[in-house]
Image (cartoon, rainbow, N blue to C red):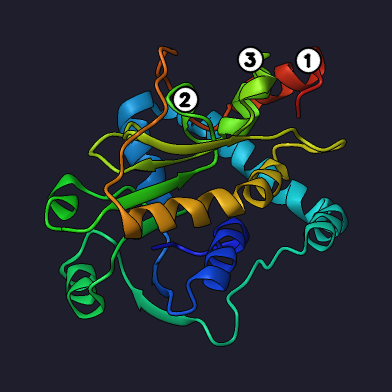
Amino acid sequence: MTAGGPHPWIIINALKQTFPNLKVVVEEPEGRMAFLRRRARRLGWVAVLGQFATMMVIRAGKLVLAGRIRRIIASDGLMTSPSPDQQMVKLGSVNSDAFLSILDDIKPAAILLVGCRMMAAKTLARISCPVLNYHAGITPQYRGMNGGYWALATGDGGNFGSTVHLVDPGVDTGPVIAQVRCAPRDGDTIMTYAYTQAAASRQMCVDALILATTRPLVSNVQSEAISRQWYHPSLWQYLRTGMSKGVW
């Protein structure tokens, strides 16, 4: 289950090599204003507008760094768009009766969420198979957005990586099934961290789905780390961290 984008397709295409009958459900991305309003209810408009400014910087930065991104894709043999023979079903939202109807037809052994909106508790409660999530960050320390960036920004580079966890009603709070830690490449920034994380996470996601489809899932990762949800940095946070710590 995905809303699309290059990073999710890196993971999905890796899965397809092991699961040739992989079915992909693609939802429409959440509208930007709906996203901003929802976050503003939690954080306030001043914080959200600062985050939105950084989001626009990231979007522009990806255009500027397009050549570097192409080199990353080529060096790791990444596939950032659907393969021509990929079976896909499109719908409006994961939290819809249409999605549940699709599951009734597919009868999946397991579901992996990769870059889609948060699954509502009422939707999750109606699904009988294991539901996992690929998260580009180490949980529970770096739940939410930009987990790799925040690990570096807080001086915790040893926790730059990704997680596959079971989905529960919280934000990236479910039991951890697998984690991979890696290192940013020279010249990586917030515009490219997700490519590095996805490239390092392909086998982890394959292994997690093999587990989910062959035996009961039990978390084997115990952590006493403080659990925290992160968001996009505000533009002023991003600039301050870049200039003071060299983390961009």
- Above or below: residue 73 compared with residue 195: below
Q: Is residue 31 visible?
A: no
Q: CA distance from mark 2 to mark 1?
A: 24 Å
Per the rendering, the mark at residue 173 is none
**Residue neighbourhood size for the residue with mark 2, other residues' Cα within 10 Å, grouped as few (<14), some (14–19), many (≥20):** few
**Residue nearest the observer in this picture, 169 or 222:** 222
Q: CA distance from mark 1 to mark 3?
A: 9 Å
Contact (Cβ within 8 Å) of mark 1 with mark 3: no
How far across and down, in percent of the image, does residue 3 sit?
Answer: 45, 62
Name the residue carrying label 2: 46
**Residue nearest the observer in this picture, 134 or 52:** 134
Name the residue carrying label 3: 154
> Which SS class for mark 1?
helix
**Residue neighbourhood size for the residue with mark 1, other residues' Cα within 10 Å, grouped as few (<14), some (14–19), many (≥20):** few
Residue at left offset 39%, top offset 52%: 211
Amino acid type indicated by mark 1: Lys
Residue at left offset 69%, top offset 21%: 157
**Residue nearest the observer in this picture, 104 or 109:** 109
- Above or below: residue 26 compared with residue 118: below
